């Protein structure tokens, strides 16, 4: 029996005119032929009136493109920011930001983060760039204050964290950053701008892996960053232009198309996740459920202050070990065993051997990323079908 829920159970507030902005901002009808959709401008270069005098602000597509510019205007608006830069992946956005740090400087990074962030920080940032990285449990802002030194130039926040869904008090950590003249970055991938706008809480930079909810259909790899400060934007744009990790124009079109339904998708997925998480809590074969939208989450009150809903990501511990967990995942019929998240389809994985397999084993164990931890990205299918699928698979696994 699927419990009846009210919208207020899983959504705490709704951003003003979100879908209207997602559909219209930057996306004006094309003036010559009246095309309703923004054209896909495939040209890599642009004719100039005279040497050094382009017809518009575009001269070479690595540096800018009309299709990309329309998308960037839209994303900036959804994140309540003035500026946006888009990339070929979330990792490209991350490396662009880290590239403005210098040899000998220091980054404080949330300890429980996306495996790709861990990999980049532990290897390229430290070994290749000579930038010190401190991994800190920043769910306690006091830990951040204690870790700050004169060398600290950047604080990297991810909230909810990946994969244990801890919540970082963005306002508190960003306050510490500002007091010490340190840049603050928030990875907003799990929450999306629909459920959380870090800039409103004091973040200098918001970064998204648009591959996930922004794209929403598991068919495009994409990244973005937004900020308000023009001088900071200029530094980041120079880094991005020099690095060359710009997205393809067709990928920009796909993201622009998908943003139009972001509210509808995230809203439905969040509702499904809330119902599904309540079901998991009632199942005796599940050891523990981690979902920000449940009162059982230790930071649920912070979630209600900071986010507009619990989101569509759930993590849970299966009773038993890797054998039972593996049997569970292989027995599922609707859930797809795959990495990534945020698509319309429900995905499931074991972080210890998949998304976070490159994280050192001792670090994984310390963070609770054990072999019986399962991460679920809830999609927009019929939630009763998802529950029935999980129920049968859990029975088959024990």
Image (cartoon, rainbow, N blue to C red):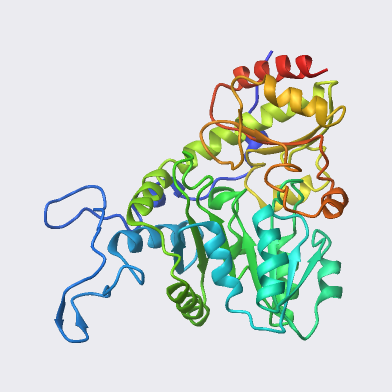
Q: Quadrant of the C terminus?
A: top right
Figure check: 364 above or below 171: above
When asked about the image quadrant of residue 276, the answer is: top right
Q: Is residue 187 left or right of residue 251?
A: right
Is residue 142 or residue 373 the one in the foreground? 373
Position of residue 10 measured from the top left corner of the image (x, y, whole percent) = 65, 36
State the residue at coordinates (59%, 48%). 195
Figure check: 158 above or below 142: above
Position of residue 346 measured from the top left corner of the image (x, y, whole percent) = 58, 31
Position of residue 298 measured from the top left corner of the image (x, y, whole percent) = 84, 45
**Would you say residue 348 is visible in this rendering?**
yes
Q: Quadrant of the N terminus?
A: top right
State the residue at coordinates (70%, 49%). 162
State the residue at coordinates (60%, 45%). 13
Q: Is residue 253 left or right of residue 327?
A: left
**Would you say residue 114 is visible in this rendering?**
no
Q: Is residue 125 left or right of residue 211?
A: right
């Amino acid at each position: 029996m699927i419990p009846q829920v009210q919208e207020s159970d899983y959504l705490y507030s709704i951003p003003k005119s979100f879908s209207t902005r997602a559909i219209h901002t930057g996306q004006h009808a094309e003036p010559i032929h009246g095309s309703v959709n923004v054209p896909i401008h495939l040209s890599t270069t642009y004719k100039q009136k005279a040497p050094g005098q382009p017809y518009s602000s575009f001269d070479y597509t690595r540096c800018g493109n009309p299709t990309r510019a329309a998308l960037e205007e839209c994303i900036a608006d959804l994140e309540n920011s003035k500026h946006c830069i888009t990339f070929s992946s979330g990792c490209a956005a991350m490396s662009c930001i880290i590239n403005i740090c210098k040899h000998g400087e220091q980054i404080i990074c949330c300890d429980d983060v996306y495996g790709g962030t861990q990999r980049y920080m532990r290897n390229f940032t430290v070994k290749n760039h000579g930038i010190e990285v401190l991994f800190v449990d920043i769910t306690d802002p006091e830990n951040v204050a204690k870790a700050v030194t004169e060398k600290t130039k950047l604080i990297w926040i991810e909230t909810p964290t990946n994969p244990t869904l801890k919540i970082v008090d963005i306002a508190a950590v960003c306050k510490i950053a500002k007091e010490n003249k340190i840049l603050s970055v928030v990875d907003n991938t799990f929450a999306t701008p629909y459920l959380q706008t870090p800039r409103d809480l004091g973040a200098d930079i918001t970064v998204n892996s648009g591959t996930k909810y922004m794209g929403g259909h598991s068919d495009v790899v994409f990244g973005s960053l937004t900020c308000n400060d023009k001088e900071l934007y200029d530094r980041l744009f120079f880094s991005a232009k020099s690095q060359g990790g710009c997205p393809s124009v067709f990928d920009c079109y796909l993201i622009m198309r998908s943003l139009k339904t972001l509210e509808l998708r995230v809203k439905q997925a969040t509702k499904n996740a809330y119902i599904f998480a309540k079901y998991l809590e009632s199942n005796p074969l599940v050891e523990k459920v981690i979902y920000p939208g449940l009162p059982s989450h230790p930071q649920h009150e912070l979630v209600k202050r900071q986010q507009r809903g619990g989101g569509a990501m759930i993590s849970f511990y299966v009773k038993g070990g890797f054998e039972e967990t593996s049997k569970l995942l292989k027995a599922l019929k609707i859930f797809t065993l795959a990495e990534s998240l945020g698509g319309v389809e429900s995905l499931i994985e074991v972080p210890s051997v998949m998304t976070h397999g490159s994280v050192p084993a001792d670090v994984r164990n310390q963070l609770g990323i054990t072999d019986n931890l399962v991460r679920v990205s809830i999609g927009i299918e019929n939630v009763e079908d998802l529950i029935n699928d999980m129920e049968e698979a859990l029975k088959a696994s024990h």
